Every structure is written in structure tokens, then in C-alpha cells.
Amino acid sequence: MKKRLGTIMLAVTMVLSLSLAACSKSNETASVSNSPVPTSAATEKANSLKPYKLVMAFPGSTPKDLAAVNEEMSKYLKDKINATIELRPIDWGAWNDKTNLMFASNEQLDVMWTSSWMGLGQQVAKGQVIALDDLINSNGQGIKSIIDPAVVEGGKINGKVYGAVTNKEFASTRGIVMRKDLVEKYKIDVTQLKELKDFGPVFEKIKQNEPGMTPLQAEAGNSPVTQMLPFDSLGDGPGGLVRGTTDLKVVNMIGTPAYMDLAKLMRQWFEAGYVNKDAASRNDGVANAVKSGKAFSYAVAMKPGIELQESRNTGTPMVAIELTKPFMTTGDTTSSMLAIPTTSADPQRAMMFINLLFTDKTLINMLNWGLEGKHFVKGADGSIDYPTGVTAATSGYNLNQSWMFGNQMNTYLWKGEDPKLWDLYKKFNDSAEKSPALGFVFNPDSVKNEITAINNASQQYSGIVATGSLDPEKTIPQYLQKLEAAGVNKVIAEKQRQLDEWLKTKKK
């Protein structure tokens, strides 16, 4: 996936609220099932429905052939639910501003991508998205048959479901991806890259031998600092559990030695010229710099099949180096979802469409990969590839964001991907260390004003610290002062209170 395209923070909101996957071992089996499921009865009543145009927004670049895909999806949906569709990709860096503007102007929006690390809690608190419980019961039977109820529970806010959880992997590990051609050209021994600090000599080699190329592409929302922090953020706002903790004490991660150590390493690399100088002000996707031939590597959240995924993202073969072990938290059950905004004029139709993204293979693959014959071709073994003369770099429709939408287990596998990839996802989940707070959901309502103030204060510091742009030994103390003035201690105390109450119920 393009985590989350990674991913993981466009401002410190994401540094502080990034979370990974959560579900029990039995849940994982159900969650990655690719068994056929019946379509909702509502999809069989298209002729009785009034025509309706759906508008769907999600972060990502705008493909050249978007209009053609819109047209074909609309033809398909007309026969299913008597609807047409307008897909609206919005650049990652502009996502928050543009979606907030759409809400402020009461612009029609029927389906939108959301997540725990991109503001779902705030969207609920602001009344921007609606609860889906009744809609799922009436028009989301396919969703109910695929997503385990326990996984859905982890994504509830105030006891209600606000997003249809993408059926994908429910764990994550972290690492660095590098251009394979340069790894081979300079005979880089990848077996010696076991810790983040081991990459220093590799970056120096690239700097000395590839003039004009950035050894490590970073940006405010994606750097080794944001990717490698070892904690469970426990939902919206600051405060989390250090990975491996036994006392379940909620701490301010910005004040931990782990954060300082990562920031110092990034500062060292920034001063050495390994990191792009405009990193703190960028939010346009680290993979794009590799795609344009300007960068060698970047940090990424990993899972089975990540090398081929990032090779498609960049248009060049990539090598992935895993630096952490799989970890599960409640947050990843909400790391990718589809929500229905309050500005939808037909929430029932919106839910019918979402349900199809879970149950209809033709539709989900059209959304993910475009048009068969034009953007992909299917091989005899069922895998897909680019048509002759087309590459990841030249394709007119190359979203490569299947982790965002509906049932990823219904998407075609690409040539070269392991045909048992979905089974590998299950094994990946099974091997993950589980957070002791697995299943805990934080309710931010009582401290939403503080969280807003913290987010505003964080915008001043998160990017410059995460990218090494300023000395962290001077900047982090200032950062902590701003957070304290904004109410960070109150938010952490409220998280601790709720976590303690949750633990009591677990012991009963």
C-alpha cells in the first residue's frame, strides 16, 4: 500500500496519533478471507431507484485518465444502483485544507476516505461524518459478512461506527526502500543493514557518486522519525504507550529518549546532505522524488508485497529493508476506512456503493487499477500487468492505493506478486506483537479543544524536527513547552483515565 501512502503524518497530529493494526488471532482469519459474498439486496433494485450522482474524495494524485475511469465506473454503477460517480483525488498535502473547505461550503460529498491518523476523531467531533450502524444493517450486508465484528468494535467512537474498515493487513512494520539498480551498481550489502544508523555509509556512497540525487527523501509527514517511533498512540491526540511497556503508563512521546535519538540521527543526516533541504515544507509524496529520478530511498510502513507495491509507486524496482518487527494496535483497524459525510444527499446510495466496493470484484478493480486492456491486462494465471508499451511511470491511471478502498482481498495481484499474498497477510498478522491496549478506543470529546490547540502548535515544530531541519536539542524543549501550554498534560491524563477504566473491564 501507499501508506498510507504510507505515511504517516502530514503534521504532528500524525506523529502523535499514528497507530497500527488491531485484531485477535481469530479475527485475522476472518478479516483476510477472500470467500465470495452475496451482494446487498439493495443492489438488485437499481430500476426502482432515482438516478443519483455520487461524489467520492480521497487523497492521492490525479491520474491523466481519470475521466475515462469515471465514465466506465458510472456505466457499471448505473446497472447496479442507478448511480454515476465522480472520483475526486486530492493531493496529500492539500487534503485537510480542501476537505475542510468542502465541509464549510456545504459542498456535496457522498463518500470520503478517512483514518485514525488523518483526523477521524476530529471529523466526528465536528459533525462532518455520520454514524453508519443503521446504514450498514440496511445496505451493507456484504461489509458485515467480511469484516469481523471485533475489528469493527475497535474503530467505534462513542459506541458508534463511523467508517467502513478496509479489509487488508492488520499489522505493520517499518523500514527503508531503496532503488534496486543503485543497490546493485554500488554492491551495497543489504544483509548488513539491520538498524537505521547502518544506512549512513550507504547514503554517503550515493551522495559521492550520484550528483544531484537525494540519498534519503523525507517530508514533514514521512521520515524515519515519524515511521520508527516505537509506541501505541492510543487514538487521537498526544500520549501513547511505549512499545514493550508493562506498566501501561501513557507518556508524551515527544518527550521520550526514543524521539530525541531519532531526531538527532535525522539532524546528523540532514547536515551531511543526505536529506532533501526542503523536507520540512514538502508533503507531496516521497515516492514521487524517486519516480522523477531525484531520490534514492525513503522510509515506509511495510507488509508482505511491499517491494512490488513501491516499485509500482516509483516506476522503478525497489529493495525493502525491514528494521522493526510487526506490531498491532487498535488504531490500525481505523487506519483506512470509507466514511459518509453529512453533506451527502443520499447516504443510503452512498452505503450501497461502499458495499459494492467490498463485494464486487469488477468495481473494486476498476477503481484500483483502471480499465482492462488500457491500464492493465490479465494473464492466464489471473495476475495482471501493464499493457505492452505501458509502465508504472507512463500509465494513465496508476493510483496504486488498493489499501484504501473496501475489500483489498478482492483486488487482482500483479505479475510477480506471490499468488498466496493474502495468506501471507494472515501470517503477518499472526506473527505481530500485540499492544497491551489492543481494543482500547479513546474518546477525545472532553479534550477536543486541547487537541485542536496542540495540533496548531505542533504544525510549527513537527516537520522541522522529523526531517532534521533544526537542532533537536534546542527545538524539542521549545516544542514541549508549546505542547504543555496547549494542554498536552490534560489530554494525556484523560487518556490514562480512560485506559485505566478500560483495563478494569478487561479484568472482569
Image: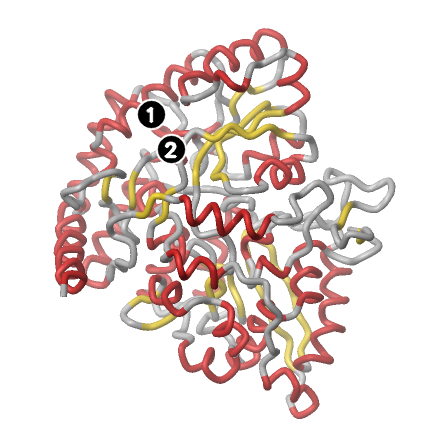
Residue located beneath label 2 in the image: 228
> In this image, 24 relative to 244: left or right?
right
User: Mark 1 or mark 2, which has the lower sequence index?
Assistant: 2
Residue at coordinates 59% horizontally, 35% vertically from top-left? 287
Residue located beneath label 1 in the image: 262
Indicate the position of residue 141 as horizontal and vertical percent values.
Answer: 52, 78
Q: Is residue 428 above or below residue 168?
A: above
Q: How many marks?
A: 2
Indicate the position of residue 153 as horizontal and vertical percent values.
Answer: 34, 67
Q: Are marks 1 and 2 in contact (CB under 8 Å)?
A: yes
Residue 190 shows in the view: yes
Residue 375 shows in the view: no
Front residue of 162 and 107: 162
Pointer 1: residues within 10 angstroms few (<14), some, or many (20+)?
A: many
Three-letter residue code for mark 2: Met
Picture quarter containing residue 463? top left
Three-letter residue code for mark 1: Leu
